[in-house]
């Protein structure tokens, strides 16, 4: 049929492309078929600040982290005995979570079923500033560096970069939906944080290197 009506195939393909971009059907990642970032994505790739209790849907958070460099900056308060999830993005399929338990900060990265855990960080009461720098290395690989109150405390490879968690979004102060860490969820449920979280800031950086440029 396509060989018989090549003109109609091109017409239908163009119509589909137009509708897919209009209604945000296409993936957020670039592809050889659709190079460049759609305008509706470019508008969202800018620093954003979120707060505990805010509903953050996937279209609002994924463009900031999808196969690109990014930085997460958390400003919170910690006092002895405070426990719970600082932030969680993603779910059992893939994602990442920061949480505090027994006076220590945990970072766990779920790389499509592979659990990668950074060394825990002993905390002191007071202001808690968490900075996490993610580097998209190309070929869908990435690494991360974790800082607490300005001091580097951990770094390492983190497996595949993320393409999308279509039903998840970002949770701040709990992990209320599909949990990133099933083991943690079985122990504590949504594990709401007992302290104060002032804000969480996402700063998107450069997209991962193009394979042709590597």
Image (spheres, rainbow, N blue to C red):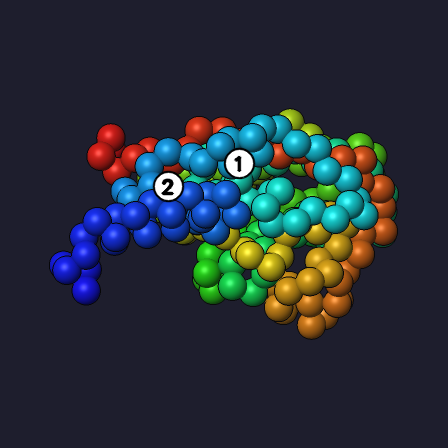
Instruction: Answer above or below: position of 167 versus 196.
Output: below
Mark 2, Cα crowd under 10 Å, few <14 / some 14-19 / many 20+, is some
Compared across the picture, whether 2 is left or right of 47 comes to left
Compared across the picture, whether 118 is left or right of 36 comes to right
For residue 30, which numbered disc appears in the image?
2
Give whichever of 202, 83 is nearer the camera.
202
Q: Earlier in the sequence, mark 2 or mark 1?
A: 2
Q: At 71% across and 58% down in the image, what residue appears?
A: 175
The picture places residue 55, in percent across and down from the top left corner, at 74, 48
Would you name the residue on which mark 1 appears? 40
Identify the secondary structure beneath mark 1: helix
The picture places residue 135, in percent across and down from the top left corner, at 44, 36
Q: Is residue 8 visible?
A: yes
Q: At 73% across and 38% down in the image, what residue appears?
A: 50
The picture places residue 40, in percent across and down from the top left corner, at 53, 36
For the C terminus, which image quadrant?
Answer: top left
Which image quadrant is residue 62 in? top right
For the N terminus, which image quadrant?
Answer: bottom left
Mark 1, Cα crowd under 10 Å, few <14 / some 14-19 / many 20+, is few
Q: At 24% across and 30% down in the image, what residue appears?
A: 213
């Amino acid at each position: 049929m396509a060989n018989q009506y090549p003109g109609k195939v091109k017409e239908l393909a163009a119509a589909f492309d137009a509708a897919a971009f209009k209604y945000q059907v296409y993936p957020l990642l670039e592809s050889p078929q659709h190079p460049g970032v759609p305008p509706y994505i470019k508008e969202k790739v800018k620093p954003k600040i979120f707060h505990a209790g805010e509903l953050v849907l996937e279209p609002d958070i994924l463009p900031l982290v999808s196969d690109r460099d990014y930085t997460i900056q958390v400003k919170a308060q910690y006092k002895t005995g405070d426990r719970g999830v600082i932030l969680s993005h993603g779910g059992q399929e893939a994602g990442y979570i920061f949480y505090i338990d027994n006076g220590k900060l945990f970072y766990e990265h779920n790389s499509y079923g592979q659990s990668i855990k950074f060394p825990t960080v002993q905390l002191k009461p007071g202001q808690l500033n968490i900075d996490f720098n993610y580097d998209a290395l190309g070929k869908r690989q990435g690494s991360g560096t974790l800082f607490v109150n300005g001091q580097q405390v951990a770094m390492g490879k983190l497996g595949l970069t993320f393409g999308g968690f279509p039903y998840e979004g970002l949770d701040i102060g709990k992990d209320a939906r599909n949990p990133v860490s099933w083991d943690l969820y079985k122990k504590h449920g949504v594990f709401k944080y007992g302290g104060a979280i002032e804000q969480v800031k996402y700063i998107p950086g450069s997209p991962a290197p193009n394979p042709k440029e590597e």
